[in-house]
Image (cartoon, grey):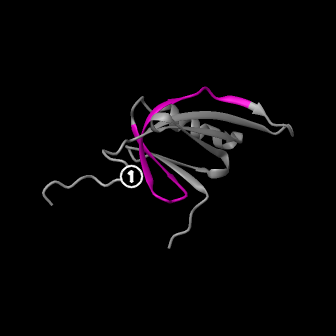
Amino acid sequence: MSEISENITFKKDSGEKIEVLQKFVGLKARQGRILTINFRTPQENVEDIKNFFEGLQNSQPLTYDIGNTGEVQCYFKGVSPLLQQKDEAGFEYYFLSATLQELKNDYDDDELPSCNGC
């Protein structure tokens, strides 16, 4: 049995990938299988994240994998401008948000496809 890692891995269809510690990532599910990924990260991590997502084209396929639990296929929808901010303690961090749309199965996970003539 493999252990769940502390990273979220994003991978482009070209094979290029980036790993980000889960503690720097917030996920928000929205209607229509839209997923907003919020990165709140120190300066040393932000350039790699920014370069990875800004290099994507709209509707380009990619996958994400939370803690080695399995890849989820999706399409890239967009990325927000990079913001430099400070928290209550004066710690400087960078905020970037990427929007993905999960690929839709032909059926709901709860119901198996019908088998005509099985």
Q: Residue at x 72, y 30 (%)?
A: 84
Name which quarter of the figure residue 43 lies in: top right
Name the residue that disc number 1 marks.
109
In magenta segment, residue 73: yes
Magenta span: predominant SS is strand
Q: Position of residue 75 (x, y in %)?
A: 41, 37
Q: Position of residue 10 (x, y in %)?
A: 49, 47
Give whichever of 9, 73 is nearer the camera: 73
Asked if residue 118 is positioned above or below residue 28 in the image, the reply reads: below
Please give left or right for residue 5 compared with residue 10 in the image: right
Please, what secondary structure does the residue beneath circle 1 have? loop
Q: Amino acid at mark 1?
A: Asp
Q: Residue at x 67, y 34 (%)?
A: 95
Q: Residue furthest top?
A: 81
Q: Residue furthest right?
A: 89
Give whichever of 44, 59 is nearer the camera: 59
Q: Residue at x 43, y 49 (%)?
A: 72
Q: Position of residue 64 (x, y in %)?
A: 48, 48
Q: Residue furthest bottom?
A: 1
Q: Position of residue 114 (x, y in %)?
A: 24, 53
Q: How many marks?
A: 1
Asked if residue 10 is positioned above or below residue 87 in the image, the reply reads: below
Name which quarter of the figure residue 101 lies in: top left
Q: Residue at x 39, y 32 (%)?
A: 59
Determine crowd level at label 1: few under 14, some 14-19, many 20+ residues with C-alpha closer than 10 A. few
Quarter in which the C terminus is drawn? bottom left
In magenta segment, residue 16: no
The boundaries of the magenta stretch are 61-84
